[in-house]
Image (cartoon, rainbow, N blue to C red):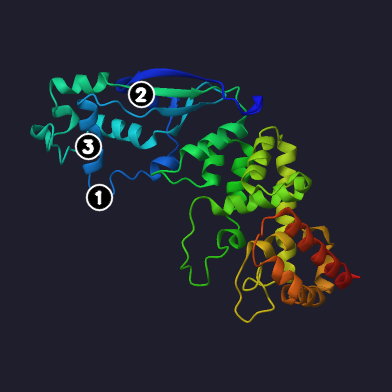
């Protein structure tokens, strides 16, 4: 493991009572991101699983460690242990009654406030917490976050970025993702395809990352987008405004050439389906062309794009390995040549 991949951390055993107090402080010292709490799973089929966790705590069974990431304000963001800590807080807030208890059957139907002396035992139960210090590179914390969150919470890469790289640029992604062409990307005319997990924000981020730093891409898309998010933490207001203008200009340019029904689609086929490849090509190129030229050459550009999509080589480049650097470069080269011919 290289020096940059070595974590700086410390451990602490927190009583449940302290965890709850830190989570409820104003501002909170223990951050349970709303995105993660929304995905709380232990109440899906009643409170049986949550009750079993409470019972394990009362039995003093050793608990798995929780992992926190320290932010700039020295508060701790929970990156692993959301289900456990959320259950602790909800139980102590009397949000559910115990059920399915076997070691303590007399507690079935009881809430925290009805536990008597066992309430104090529960509050004093400790759990080992591993804190990743703020001095760690955010990209490294993002990787650890991704590795740890493969269980019940099921977070997307963009949800993790939203938690770790909060700031003006992250807010910009949320703002721009509300554009209809982005918000409705790949959901179908009837809106039957469910979208979640901040997919639109990742789509916007993808545009910026490839537009601004395409030369740094090395076949690992997740790391590439993480790195751009980390760089974004240093963007000032002027840079944010420039990025907003650039994105909206590119999106508007795409709308000048393509209709709502075929934007970001393979228009060589009768059945129009949107794809990330077409989004990348069009958003990355049309914004650089004068608006009057786009209007004047609209049909030629559409014809060129249809020819591209229908060409055997391009089809091979979209049949697999979409994110390979060589495939991306070749697709860009093929489209760049056809686009140049169309507007000349």
Cα–Cα gap, marks 3 and 1: 13 Å
Q: Position of residue 323 (x, y in %)?
A: 67, 56
The label shown at residue 52 is: 3
Instruction: Check the image and name the residue furthest to the right.
Output: 344
- On the image, which quarter does residue 26 sit in? top left
The secondary element bearing badge 2 is classed as helix
Give the answer, above or below, for where 58 lies relative to 152.
Answer: above
**Residue shown at 78% from the left, 57% from the top:** 329
Q: Which of the image's four quarters has the C terminus?
A: bottom right
Cα–Cα gap, marks 1 and 2: 26 Å
Q: Which residue is mark 2?
A: 19
Does residue 16 appear left or right of residue 165 in this picture? left
**Residue shown at 45% from the left, 36% from the top:** 33
The label shown at residue 184 is: none
**Residue shown at 65% from the left, 47% from the top:** 220
Of mark 3 and mark 1, the one earlier in the sequence is: 1
Does residue 296 appear left or right of residue 156 in this picture? right
Does residue 28 appear left or right of residue 231 in this picture? left
- Dots 3, 1 in contact, CB < 8 A: no
Q: Which residue is mark 1?
A: 45
Cα–Cα gap, marks 3 and 2: 20 Å
Of labels 3 and 2, the one closer to you: 3
The secondary element bearing badge 1 is classed as loop
Of labels 1 and 2, the one closer to you: 1
Of labels 3 and 1, the one closer to you: 3
Badge 3 crowding class, 10 Å Cα cut-off, few under 14, some 14 to 19, many 20 or more, is some
The secondary element bearing badge 3 is classed as helix
Instruction: Check the image and name the residue furthest to the left.
Output: 106
**Residue shown at 56% from the left, 59% from the top:** 183
């Amino acid at each position: 493991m290289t020096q940059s991949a070595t974590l700086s951390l410390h451990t602490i055993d927190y009583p449940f009572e302290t965890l709850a107090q830190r989570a409820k402080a104003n501002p909170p010292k223990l951050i349970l991101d709303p995105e993660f709490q929304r995905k709380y799973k232990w109440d899906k089929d009643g409170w049986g699983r949550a009750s079993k966790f409470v019972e394990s705590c009362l039995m003093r069974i050793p608990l798995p460690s929780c992992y926190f990431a320290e932010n700039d304000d020295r508060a701790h963001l929970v990156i692993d242990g959301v289900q456990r800590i959320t259950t602790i807080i909800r139980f102590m807030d009397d949000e559910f009654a115990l059920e399915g208890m076997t070691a303590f059957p007399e507690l079935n139907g009881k809430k925290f406030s009805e536990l008597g002396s066992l309430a104090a035992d529960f509050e004093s139960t400790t759990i080992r917490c591993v804190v990743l210090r703020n001095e760690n590179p955010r990209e490294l914390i993002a990787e650890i976050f991704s590795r740890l969150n493969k269980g019940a919470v099921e977070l997307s890469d963009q949800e993790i970025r939203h938690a770790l790289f909060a700031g003006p640029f992250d807010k910009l992604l949320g703002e721009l993702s509300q554009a209809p062409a982005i918000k409705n990307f790949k959901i179908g005319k009837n809106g039957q395809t469910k979208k979640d997990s901040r997919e639109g924000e990742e789509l916007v981020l993808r545009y910026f990352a490839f537009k601004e730093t395409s030369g740094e891409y090395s076949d690992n898309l997740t790391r590439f987008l993480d790195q751009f998010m980390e760089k974004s933490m240093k963007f000032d207001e002027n840079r944010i405004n420039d990025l907003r203008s650039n994105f909206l200009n590119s999106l508007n340019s795409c709308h000048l050439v393509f209709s709502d029904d075929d934007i970001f689609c393979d228009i060589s086929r009768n059945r129009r389906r949107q794809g990330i490849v077409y989004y990348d090509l069009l958003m990355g190129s049309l914004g650089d062309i004068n608006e009057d030229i786009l209007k004047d050459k609209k049909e030629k550009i559409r014809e060129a794009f249809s020819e591209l999509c229908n060409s055997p080589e391009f089809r091979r480049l979209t049949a697999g390995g979409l994110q390979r650097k060589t495939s991306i470069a070749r697709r860009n080269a093929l489209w760049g040549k056809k686009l140049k011919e169309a507007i000349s």
